[in-house]
């Protein structure tokens, strides 16, 4: 399956101004992407405040990259709690499609070769 990655920085930056206006361009792109037989990956500044609305309104969305927000929220709520919070944001989207899969990626720090938490991805696996 081929995908296109959408940068959601503009959406996240302007989300507080009004959801409908902010999401309009992404919905338009989603329509075109689906007509081409592709799916969407999205990321950049998606967080607990704006993720659910984005996921609910972009039907072709298959995966979100939310590593930065996940790490920031983990400092306040703990990793286990944060993963559950993000999965709840995406649960409605994937409820009827299939199994929701959560992955926490781990990479090595190049300076000391110790593992560090890198990112989080939630996607549909059928």
Image (cartoon, grey):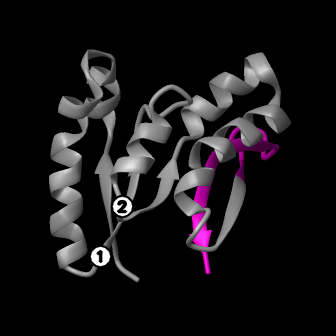
- Above/below status of 122 relative to 54: below
Residue 35: percent from left, percent from top: 18, 77
Q: Nearer the viewer, mark 1 or mark 2?
A: 2
Q: Give the residue drawn at x 63%, y 52%.
A: 91
Q: What element carries label 2?
A: loop
User: For this view, does 86 lie left or right of residue 12?
Assistant: right
Question: Which residue is labeled 1 in the image?
Answer: 38
The tag on residue 59 is 2
Nearest the eye: 83 or 116:
83
- Above/below status of 110 relative to 18: below
Separation (CA) of disc 1 from disc 2:
12 Å
Task: Identify the image quadrant of the C terminus.
Answer: bottom right
Residue 118: percent from left, percent from top: 65, 44
Q: Quadrant of residue 73?
A: top right
Badge 1 local density, few (<14 within 10 Å), some, or many (20+)?
Answer: some
Please indicate, yes or no, whether residue 25 appears anywhere in the rendered image: yes
Magenta part, dominant SS: strand
């Amino acid at each position: 399956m081929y995908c296109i990655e959408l940068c959601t920085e503009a959406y996240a930056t302007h989300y507080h101004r009004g959801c409908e206006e902010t999401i309009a361009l992404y919905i338009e792109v989603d329509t075109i992407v689906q007509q081409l037989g592709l799916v969407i990956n999205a990321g950049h500044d998606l967080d607990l405040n704006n993720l659910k609305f984005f996921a609910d309104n972009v039907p072709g969305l298959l995966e979100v990259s939310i590593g930065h927000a996940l790490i920031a929220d983990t400092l306040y709520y703990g990793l286990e709690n944060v993963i559950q919070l993000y999965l709840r944001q995406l649960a409605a989207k994937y409820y009827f499609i299939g199994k929701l899969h959560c992955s926490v990626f781990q990479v090595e720090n190049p300076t000391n070769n110790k593992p560090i938490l890198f990112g989080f991805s939630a996607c549909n696996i059928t």
